[in-house]
Amino acid sequence: MPPTIAFIGSGNLGRTIAQLAAEAGFDVVLSNSRGPETLTDLVAELPGHARATTPAQAAQAADLVVVSLPFHAMEQLPAEALAGKTVIDTMHYFPDRDGRLAELDERRTTSSELLQRRLPDSPIVKTLSSMDFIRMYSGARPIGHPERSALPVTGNDAEAKAEVARFMDTIGYDAVDIGSLADSWRHEAGIPMNVLPYIGEPPKGMNQEQAHDWVYNGPSAVVSASHVRELTDQATRTGRVGLFPEDLFPVDK
Ligand SMILES: NC(=O)c1ccc[n+]([C@@H]2O[C@H](COP(=O)([O-])OP(=O)(O)OC[C@H]3O[C@@H](n4cnc5c(N)ncnc54)[C@H](OP(=O)(O)O)[C@@H]3O)[C@@H](O)[C@H]2O)c1
């Protein structure tokens, strides 16, 4: 029997990881907020035995569950159905989208620690969140490929991190363990590790609109495991929390 992986949230990023998983031979179970009937087209596009269901049923269908929602929607996650399941947290906190959370704005905790608090019986592993969904798909490479990229991983449970690293291996990425959920700010949105290393060197003198376009349509770059380590080691917890990648570019206003 092929392994099964479930998704709560099947938007841009969730469906991209689902596509990579289905191509790697996983049976994929998808869910969203509007109901399984809205995922019929996506299910039909995926190879293998993909299906769609409700979030609670998706959680029950697999031992590994990818949660890929706007961060504010994590309050609606089915905690009971997720108990005992390893949860991959791909979410970022963007105050402009998610509403302000003082604990995060004041850097007293991390978004993944808040998720762990919401799902106390599910080991949380934050990863697959450092690239935009377009490059996530186009950048996947088999083990040993010279253009294979690495992604940072954080979590409190070593076994869960190892399980997630094996999954990442099969879908095309090396996992770099950079610590616990308390360390996960090192790859949150607004930290230079997020998105920027995976895109080509931006030309100088772009305006805000050109910078936005470069983030989503510019070229890709390969990021090695040692580069991930270097970037996350050097990260500093300063500046505003939850900035978009283009906010970090030096742009002409
Ligand atoms: N997009 C990227 O490139 C990228 C990269 C790194 C990290 N991220 C992070 O990953 C997360 C997902 O981003 P995205 O771009 O994929 O968002 P998106 O395209 O807006 O998709 C969000 C998904 O979450 C579902 N959803 C919302 N509320 C839900 C609920 N209460 N229960 C179940 N499903 C719910 C939506 O379902 P409905 O459509 O039915 O409402 C949709 O399938 C965000 O936290 C984002 O910051 C995204």
Image (cartoon, grey):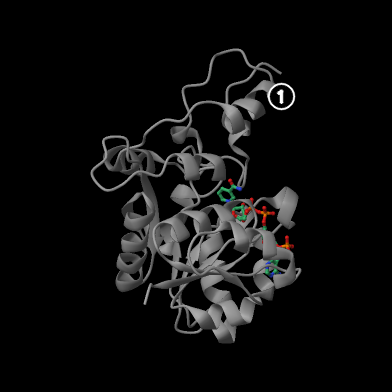
Residue 35's image quarter?
bottom right
Residue 119's image quarter?
bottom right
Looking at the image, which residue is at 62% across and 51% down? 12
Direction bottom: furthest residue: 80
Q: Please name whichever residue, 228 or 199, is drawn nearer the observer in this view of the structure.
A: 199
Up-down: is 106 above or below 218? below
Looking at the image, which residue is at 58% across and 22% down? 250
| Residue 148 point in image, percent of width and height | 32, 40
Q: Is mark 1 within 8 Å of ligand 1?
A: no
Direction top: furthest residue: 205
| Residue 203 point in image, percent of width and height | 54, 15
Up-down: is 84 above or below 180? below
Q: Quadrant of the N terminus?
A: bottom left
Looking at the image, which residue is at 63% across and 20% down? 251
| Residue 155 point in image, percent of width and height | 39, 65
In the shown orientation, is residue 79 left or right of residue 185?
right
| Residue 90 point in image, percent of width and height | 53, 57
Q: Is residue 104 visible?
A: yes
Question: What number of labels is visible?
Answer: 1
Disc 1: CA contacts within 10 A as few (<14), some (14-19) or many (>=20): few
In the shown orientation, is residue 48 left or right of residue 234?
right
Looking at the image, which residue is at 61% across and 63% down? 43
Secondary-structure class at tag 1: helix
Q: Quadrant of the C terminus?
A: top right
Q: Is residue 127 visible?
A: no
Residue 164's image quarter?
bottom left
Residue under numbered circle 1: 209
Ligand 1 quadrant in view: bottom right
Q: Amino acid at mark 1?
A: Glu
